[in-house]
Image (spheres, coloured by chain):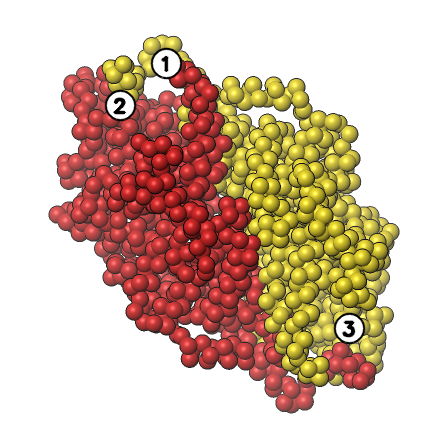
Chain colours: A red, B yellow
Amino acid sequence: MTDTTVAQTSAAARDARIDVEAVGDALLGRWKQERLEARATAEDPRLHTIPGQTMAEHRNRVFEQLGLLVEAGAIQRAYPTDLGGSDNHGGNIAAFQELVLADPSLQIKSGVQWGLFGAAILHLGTREHHERWLPDVMNLTLPGAFAMTEIGHGSDVASIGTTATYDPDTEEFEIHTPFTGAWKDYLGNAALHGQAAVVFAQLITAGVNHGVHAFFVPIRTPAGDMMPGVGSEDDGVKGGLNGIDNGRLHFSHVRIPRTNLLNRYGDVAADGTYTSDIESPGRRFFTMIGTLVQGRVSLDGASVRAMQAALAIAIRYGSERRQFPGASGRETVLLDYGQHQRRLIPRLAQSYAMAFADERLLTLFDEVFSGVGDTPENREDLETLAAALKPLSTWAALDTLQEAREACGGAGFMAKNRLTGLRADLDIYVTFEGDNNVLLQLVGKRLLTDYAAQFKNADRATLAKAAASQLGDRVSRFGLRQVGQSIADLGQVARSVESVRNPESQRALLTDRVETMISEIALALRDATKDVPKSDARARAIANEAAFNAQQHKLIAAARAHGELLQWESFTDAIERITDEPTRQVLTWLRDLFGLGLIETNAAWYLVQGRISGQRAEAVTAYIDRLIGRLREHALDLVVAFGFTPELLRAEIATGIEAERQAEAQAYVEAQRAAGTWPIHEKELRARARS
Amino acid sequence: MTDTTVAQTSAAARDARIDVEAVGDALLGRWKQERLEARATAEDPRLHTIPGQTMAEHRNRVFEQLGLLVEAGAIQRAYPTDLGGSDNHGGNIAAFQELVLADPSLQIKSGVQWGLFGAAILHLGTREHHERWLPDVMNLTLPGAFAMTEIGHGSDVASIGTTATYDPDTEEFEIHTPFTGAWKDYLGNAALHGQAAVVFAQLITAGVNHGVHAFFVPIRTPAGDMMPGVGSEDDGVKGGLNGIDNGRLHFSHVRIPRTNLLNRYGDVAADGTYTSDIESPGRRFFTMIGTLVQGRVSLDGASVRAMQAALAIAIRYGSERRQFPGASGRETVLLDYGQHQRRLIPRLAQSYAMAFADERLLTLFDEVFSGVGDTPENREDLETLAAALKPLSTWAALDTLQEAREACGGAGFMAKNRLTGLRADLDIYVTFEGDNNVLLQLVGKRLLTDYAAQFKNADRATLAKAAASQLGDRVSRFGLRQVGQSIADLGQVARSVESVRNPESQRALLTDRVETMISEIALALRDATKDVPKSDARARAIANEAAFNAQQHKLIAAARAHGELLQWESFTDAIERITDEPTRQVLTWLRDLFGLGLIETNAAWYLVQGRISGQRAEAVTAYIDRLIGRLREHALDLVVAFGFTPELLRAEIATGIEAERQAEAQAYVEAQRAAGTWPIHEKELRARARS
């Protein structure tokens, strides 16, 4: 440490030092045990990425690693107890999230096998399917692909082109991909290892298309030969995750038994009669798709973990690395530079907010999937929450990994320091399991629906008074809150934000932004068809589409603001549970930095809307600078609290090697000076001559 | 095209259609011929990246590719005519920039060999050195490393630890790396192929350190054995550029002849006497380092080229790809979505601004290096301009490659579509040849110096009137402009911005931001020591350092704003040279989008400073939306104007393959419908039953 940092550290130590263990426990959350078990597994060198392996070597290695996970009992948790699992849904995802630090390829390939292929059989199939296939899925004797996405359709699953046409004569479905765009694509396990696939296809029986359903389709023999009518193409090298054998599958009139339809939500009788417990085809589709939300929950937490790793590496290195002589007489530690702090410390605050938000998401997920709280409302809330958080955390992971990479300079670019590898692998997280922009649009639409629900029977004028009391519990949980409330109070909110430091003010400002944006969008949409005759349905549809399209960018921004508010609330709730006062203080600074950072980022909006004054906006920035200054001394503690062992982090520059090199250089110079062999610099000589 | 786009296209065609060739010529600029030659070379499949090669294979391939460049006469341009070059400095860099689309590893390895190692001999050595080594450097029989950066010092070159101590008894220098931090690191050609290195070291003679100088040091025999006392370590796998054999070099008392000092700017006589034409050690150091500016100029243009490729791929794909049914009856083309336009079209505008700014930079570079305008002032301007533009373009390239990758979904992640590979390779561009943050700080310091120069003999009060006339030509060129002018006019500027569409208003707003930020920072710095006694030099240094550190983040933001202003001006100047009216109109919209985009991004600042009203800020956003809508129909033309052949672009999704797949799917559905075999959807059936 420099003289300055020593002085600052001791000053800070007098005031507040965080309880690293308590913070670590808060971050590990409810599934601490499962997380620690998974971390212990992830420390096994046999599960680690080897940079520079060829794609073929990496794919083989990852396949073998899946076997090691089976042996370790690491992947069974979500499956039924009587089939060897433990019906532990939250714990399963929590453990899965931790695997990202072993190798993201291993993580995602295991996600394909057990979280997509296996989970589809579990959630979309029925007992007979479970007994028939799940034991082999679980022990990896039956590797499988999850064949939903097609070359031509990713985000719009409802429009996929693959068909499953029922033939009552043979009691078979015929699986067919009638054109290139209908070929399944980007599927893990498709290029090499998969022996079966859960194929999503339009179910057609008796001349009627009943929409997308899932079918169990054998694709390869155990010896690796393709089944008749099934073709596979290798996707080849990708931008990351090259340990996974992604590929295409196409089907030419491939016949499977009727009972291979995963029939939990819809079935076809031997005579071809279609039945379903869910009458509406739309709701049926979304119910089936909804069972797959665990992918998004998984990615959310995995992204947080990668973000934490990036910060642990960059902050450790930034605390040891020195560059450019300082006034103190020694070179300055990177993390003492204002710009370096601005680059890393707000992202540290963000990582905390996102970690706590993920815990909230996981809790809701467990509630739904354990059956404790499996209501349609909770399912809808879960989907909205996952759709709000996954985009923000996956983008933040890429952003943080990149900033950390740059903050470590050339060293950050070396594979041995892990930042570039994690970034390359996590790149695809922002568009898979739901494209981030599409997910945020989904959240935006939910917010608009909540908004409309509140105003269903009220005209605009009566709204301000009445709306506050219209809010049900459900809407207030993860959807739009307090719209009426704050519309009524708006003027007051604007004026009453005396101090932005106060959490109520932060909450009011963050909430207000979501609500105001949504209400403005709703208004713009409502006016879209006012000049189009009600009788002209097509013209109205076109006008609505154009109006929506004009608002799309803003709607996605509103959805992001909503997600950020949820993160801020999760962070705030987590602080409530911290009892140690100095720790609480530091975490409160960190939360304030997160909240005020959001307000600073969106300051233009707050200014234009008259929510804050120019002076207040400047005060926000000034206070952020002060918070960053205070937090600088706790930055190392705050990354130590992530609890990563060297075996998990595995970045050379995060091992203390830079501090050793600094000490060696310093010792050399001092020895030279002591021996009188240190050459005088020409500059000094000239300075002496001048004086 | 959809019905809508067809209609819009024909409407747009009536109004304005760009002259693609004229725009292409404007983009190719003054060194069009050299660029086209380089592109023809880059089309050679032997020079193309093969995704998935091992590091060893890739390194061998790239080394062989360098040989092909020699054969093609592609790398000699900058060298003296009598040694086989053509003294064409601008053309050399222009051609080099184009190579990024062959393989960035090839580009950067050739940059190491001829732009760093060779250029150091050329610019820091003298005639004897040129004759002795350059022919072998040029024909690649002498591959070499550029050994400046050390493990312990990257940005702060002046503090490197390697020493070159002169021994008059043997008339040799002893090259030595006395501690681990002094080992040279990240050097291309160091791990495998380099036979010599230009080593930067502290020149010590007669007990005096004369600062950093460059030395020619043999490191390996042609057979690949290390020279005595020289050690090498392989940096191993990196986040990209794995075709380059980066590594470390360390030296244990390695002796080289006195004449291996590259002595253009400083020399040591046989008896150990040091001489230099440049008296000040500081200025001498910066003069030597300054000869290496070509690396930054090269990266600036290479980044623009990569950005253009990303946009060409994503905009082509976005114009063909469809997703989600639209009101028109077909699925909607991605580029017709408001959000998709917001993601790609402003970046298209940015790429144009950056391309024109790079041309300006290259022109100044050529002026200095050809000798036509080699003045200290021009050298300083060149360095500032390069330091301002290189950070913005290298960051923008990563940002644009990433947005393009995401805009292409899963297809964007496939190596065969090139986006991820280019991004991985270009990642390091943001921290090498000058860390972006450090470079922007350099620009910020120059702006502060210009500011101080203007106010040298004026107190604050007399300034507003007098300063306008104090500005010399030089300061007004690439440094701070019109400070006095606009401080005088400030109130007026604020009120007179009647329409943001008008280029004068854009210029005034962009200029004003730079000036105001710099003057605020200058004021804060001036006040730093006002309470510290003049006699206490150390206390003053510490106070100054703390004040500067507190302003660092803002100073870097101001430097960025300055770079953006220069880009805006370059774009504006380029439009002046376009004669075709419709083309001019479209490029003007594009320039307005760039300019207003900057104002929108920084709207909070303009609002806080009272430069624009809230209403005006909203008008800016509304006008940006309109500009994007207008430009959507020209987006394809604007990327076609980049002039990339399929051999350069080499992205499957940019070949029209998606349009073919869409047509195939459409034809299938239509044929089924015509044959009466298209199944009715359950939804329709239910809708019919209801009605």
Which badge, 3 or 1, is on the more N-terminal residue? 3
In the image, is A38 to the left or to the right of B182?
Answer: left
Q: Which residue carries the number 3 mark?
A: B281
Q: Which residue carries the number 2 mark?
A: A210
Q: Position of residue B195 (x, y in %)?
A: 67, 62
Q: Is residue B155 visible?
A: yes
Q: Position of residue A488 (x, y in %)?
A: 38, 44
Mark 2, Cα crowd under 10 Å, few <14 / some 14-19 / many 20+, is many
Residue found at x 57% / y 36%: B622
Residue found at x 36% / y 26%: A159
Q: Give a yes or no on whether discs 3 and 2 share a subunit.
A: no
**Which element type, helix, strand or loop, lies under badge 3?**
helix
In the image, is A316 to the left or to the right of B174?
Answer: left
Q: Is residue B188 visible?
A: no
* Tags 3 and 1 touching, CB below 8 Å: no
Disc 3: host chain: B
Q: Amino acid at mark 1?
A: Gln
Location of residue A409 (image quadrant): bottom right
Q: Residue furthest top?
A: B675
Q: Which residue carries the number 1 mark?
A: B672
**Which element type, helix, strand or loop, lies under badge 2?**
strand
Q: Amino acid at mark 2?
A: His
Disc 2: host chain: A
